């Protein structure tokens, strides 16, 4: 808990390099996000995925505990984090960044598999089921990228500015989710889930605790 307090204080002071070094050396990360309660939701609505990814990367998976209840929550958090990764990849492809999208797809699912093997203790059956689910999700995202590329290629036969603009707006059915939801609606939905799942750390928490400790010392005469 003390390391998490120090990590949060360093982050709040803008000492991100020192905070990363502390996490790398101690293996202990943040217990939530610093800032306003609606920050994650606003980032998601605006498509600021870099900020969201940095926040998720800084979180300490151990804060979700080891009991059955917290284990279930940890699974929900893991699925949410993977949904965010998928959205980033789909938006990269939608923006025409094909190589970056496919590279991100590979890295995201390799990292997810490595993180899972390091942090989870499961039966062999549960592990196999999780591996199948990761493969299913990866194949689904890859298929959506291929469908998008085919659609844009077929529609971009005429080399004109107006046609290229029209082509860039095309996406396959259900590209961003079932029910053919729009990109913005999917962003809003992920933002609501992030805001609900990730705790918000009160500002100046370490300094507040130190101040309270000093007052207690004066009160007790220690």
Image (cartoon, rainbow, N blue to C red):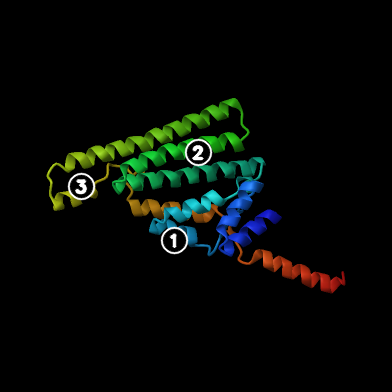
Determine the residue positioned at 46% across, 56% down.
51
109 with respect to 34 (left or right): left
Determine the residue positioned at 41% across, 35% down.
138
Residue 125 to residue 207: above or below: above
State which tag comes first along the sequence, 3 or 2: 2
Determine the residue positioned at 63% across, 62% down.
9
Q: Do the residues under discs 3 and 1 have CB atoms within 8 angstroms?
A: no
Separation of residues labelled 2 and 1 (CA atoms)? 26 Å
153 with respect to 106 (left or right): left
Q: Which residue is mark 1?
A: 42
Residue 136: x and y in percent read 42, 32
| Quarter location, residue 157 | top left
Observer-nearest of 108 and 198: 108
Determine the residue positioned at 60% across, 45% down.
61
Residue 13: x and y in percent read 58, 65
Q: Considering the numbered disc 2 on the image, is that residue within a helix, a strand or a loop?
A: helix
Q: Considering the numbered disc 3 on the image, is that residue within a helix, a strand or a loop?
A: helix
Separation of residues labelled 3 and 1 (CA atoms)? 29 Å
Q: Which residue is mark 2?
A: 111
Q: Do the residues under discs 2 and 1 have CB atoms within 8 angstroms?
A: no
As drawn, the label of residue 167 is 3
């Amino acid at each position: 808990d003390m390391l998490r307090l120090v990590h949060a204080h360093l982050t709040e002071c803008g000492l991100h390099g020192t905070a990363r070094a502390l996490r790398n050396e101690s293996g202990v990360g943040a217990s939530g996000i610093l800032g306003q309660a609606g920050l994650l939701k606003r980032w998601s609505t605006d498509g600021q995925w870099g900020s969201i990814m940095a926040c998720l990367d800084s979180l300490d998976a151990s804060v979700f505990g080891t009991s059955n209840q917290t284990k279930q929550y940890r699974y929900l958090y893991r699925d949410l984090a993977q949904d965010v990764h998928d959205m980033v990849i789909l938006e990269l492809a939608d923006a025409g960044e094909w190589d970056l999208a496919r590279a991100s797809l590979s890295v995201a699912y390799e990292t997810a598999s490595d993180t899972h093997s390091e942090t989870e203790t499961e039966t062999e059956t549960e592990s196999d089921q999780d591996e199948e689910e990761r493969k299913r999700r990866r194949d689904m995202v890859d298929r959506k990228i291929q469908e998008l590329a085919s659609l844009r290629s077929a529609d971009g036969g005429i080399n004109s500015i107006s046609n290229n603009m029209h082509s860039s707006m095309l996406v396959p059915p259900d590209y961003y989710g079932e029910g053919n939801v729009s990109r913005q609606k999917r962003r809003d939905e992920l933002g609501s889930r992030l805001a609900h799942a990730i705790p918000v750390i009160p500002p100046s928490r370490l300094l507040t605790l130190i101040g309270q400790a000093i007052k207690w010392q004066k009160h007790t005469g220690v």
